[in-house]
Image: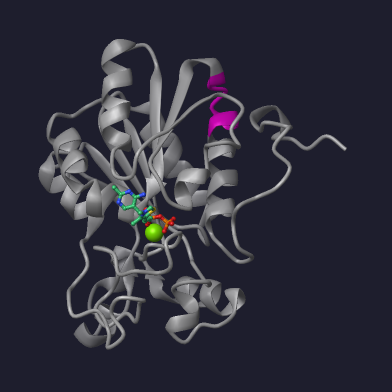
Amino acid sequence: MARDLDAYLRQEVKSTPFCPGCGHGILMNIILRAIADMELDMKNILFVSGIGCAAWIPSPHFNGDTLHTLHGRAIAFATGAKAANPKLKVIVISGDGDLTSIGGNHLIHAARRNTNLTVICANNMIYGMTGGQVASTSPLGTITATTGEGNPYRPFDLCRLVLGAGAEYAARFSVTQPLVLMAAIKKALGMEAFTFIEALSPCPTQFGRRNKADSSVQMLKALMQDCITREQAKGMDKDLLKTKIITGEFHHE
Ligand SMILES: Cc1ncc(C[n+]2csc(CCOP(=O)(O)OP(=O)(O)O)c2C)c(N)n1
Ligand SMILES: [Mg+2]
């Protein structure tokens, strides 16, 4: 039976690399729906990813040109491709570890240079693929394979980081907020500028099981509870606010 996004998926790829309950598959769906809705021509798009579970979102699944590169270097490859062919729409899709830990320098400099790329960061707050090591996005106190006593460091606020570096547009939404996340992706893809989307994506396998959310349902519910708008954050008790994630769109001032 034909499904509505079949044309956007390589039909020869029959399986998914994602664990049950992983948010990356939901994000994959949302990205392709945004592209389909905008009627963008896949022939005019290059998808670039690094290494990690999230890097499997475009490659090998998307029925278009995909460049599966080195860990931390997706933005460097994307910058080169855009420079060589400025007519290409270049979309980077990769993980939080890949884009903001090892690849953090490429991220801030692409934002500073306003390189015409859309970067979609699947943020599961951990190094998923390699066994659950702490990332620069892991919240304070998170138990990971490398922080058995709890992460002693605070995480990056990725949207503030790229805006501070010069990005024109950044947005943070969870895969549990599919419509607003899709709208933000469409807005980013419609701009000729460096744009950044932080998509919060649950990782029950590496994050959840170590941090009191054994089931994927529990993790999704927790994300739904934790994500709040800026309006909801106003006047909220400071300690409670520390446990929340402020979602929304953020513009360069
Ligand atoms: C230079 C280099 N260092 C380290 C690794 C090992 N490595 C591969 S993926 C990864 C982390 C991936 O985490 P993230 O980008 O958050 O993706 P996720 O799996 O969580 O979706 C690491 C450390 C590597 N492949 N190359
Ligand atoms: Mg990750």
Picture quarter containing residue 133? Answer: bottom left
Q: Which quadrant of the figure shows ligand 1?
A: bottom left
Query: Residue 228 location in percent, x, y?
Result: 37, 69
Which residue is painted at 53% across and 50% down in the image? 27
Along the horizontal axis of the image, is 238 left or right of 24?
Answer: left
Asked if residue 175 can be seen in this view, the reply is yes
Query: Residue 109 location in percent, x, y?
Result: 14, 36
Query: Residue 28 location in percent, x, y?
Result: 56, 45
Above or below, comparing residue 156 to residue 3 in the picture = below
Which residue is painted at 54% across and 15% down in the image? 43
- Residue 36 colored in magenta in the image: yes
Picture quarter containing residue 155? Answer: bottom left
Q: Which of the two residues, 70 or 202, is positioned nearer the viewer here? A: 70
Along the horizontal axis of the image, is 104 left or right of 23?
Answer: left
Above or below, comparing residue 251 to residue 148 in the picture = above
Above or below, comparing residue 8 to residue 72 in the picture = above
Range of magenta residues:
35-42
Q: How many marks?
A: 0
Q: Which of the two residues, 133 or 157, is positioned nearer the viewer here? A: 133
Looking at the rendered image, the quarter that the C terminus falls into is top left
Picture quarter containing residue 14? Answer: top right
Query: Residue 86 location in percent, x, y?
Result: 31, 12
Along the horizontal axis of the image, is 225 left or right of 237?
Answer: right
- Residue 119 colored in magenta in the image: no
Asked if residue 41 can be seen in this view, the reply is no
